[in-house]
Image (cartoon, helix red, strand yellow):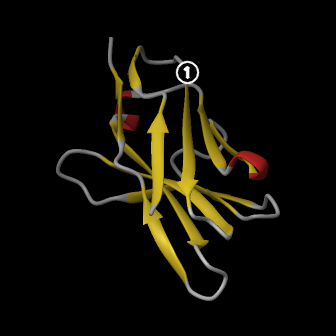
Amino acid sequence: QVQLVESGGGLVQPGGSLRLSCAASGRIFSIGNMGWYRQARGKQRELVASITADFSTNYGGSVRGRFTISRDNAKNTVYLEMNSLKPEDTAVYFCTAYLSRTGDTWGHYWGQGTQVTVSS
């Protein structure tokens, strides 16, 4: 089994910062792209940021310049540093990883989500 476990969510005031972490564990042969999505109440899930195994990054337009994605391949962990948070960043944040458990087949795995609330 493979598990992705997020941590670091919570309540923060507008303009504040949070750092999310997501660790993949279990039987893992290799991890390709990792990323973060978010889903606000009543809205569709949207890409926040993604990062390849060789550290190329991509960001959703609304977070570019405020959020930074990074990863530690030795720890199978992806991070999301969120600065200058706005109320519209309030959502459940999900991490995802495209990985192979055995080296032959690949699939997308998702974490359970962590709530981020930006409010005064």
Callout 1 environment at 10 Å: few (<14), some (14 to 19), or many (20+)? some
- Place of residue 88 in the rendered image (x, y in percent of width and height, measured from the top left): 36, 36
44 over 16 or under it: above or below: below
Q: Tag 1's secondary structure? A: loop
- In the image, what residue occupies the spot 20% across and 45% down? 41
State the image coordinates of residue 45 (x, y, percent, origin top left). 33, 59
The answer to whether residue 60 is visible is: no
In the image, residue 46 sits, relative to residue 39, either above or below, namely below
- Residue 115, x across and y down, in percent: 33, 34
Position of residue 91 measured from the top left corner of the image (x, y, whole percent): 33, 40
**For the view shown, which residue lies furthest in the left direction?**
42
* Res 10 → quadrant: top left
| Residue 29 seen | yes
| Nearer-the-camera pick, 41 or 25 | 25
Q: Which quadrant does the C terminus fall into?
A: top left
Residue bearing mark 1: 17
Q: Residue at x 32, y 18 (%)?
A: 119
Q: Residue furthest right?
A: 54
All told, the count of numbered labels is: 1
Residue at 66%, 66% (x, y): give it. Answer: 31
Above or below residue 40? Residue 87 is above
In terms of depth relative to the viewer, which is nearer, 42 or 27? 27
Left or right, residue 90 beside residue 19: left
Which is more toward the observer, 62 or 25? 25
State the quadrant of the N terminus: bottom left
Identity of the residue drawn at 28% across and 45% down: 40
Q: Amino acid at mark 1?
A: Ser
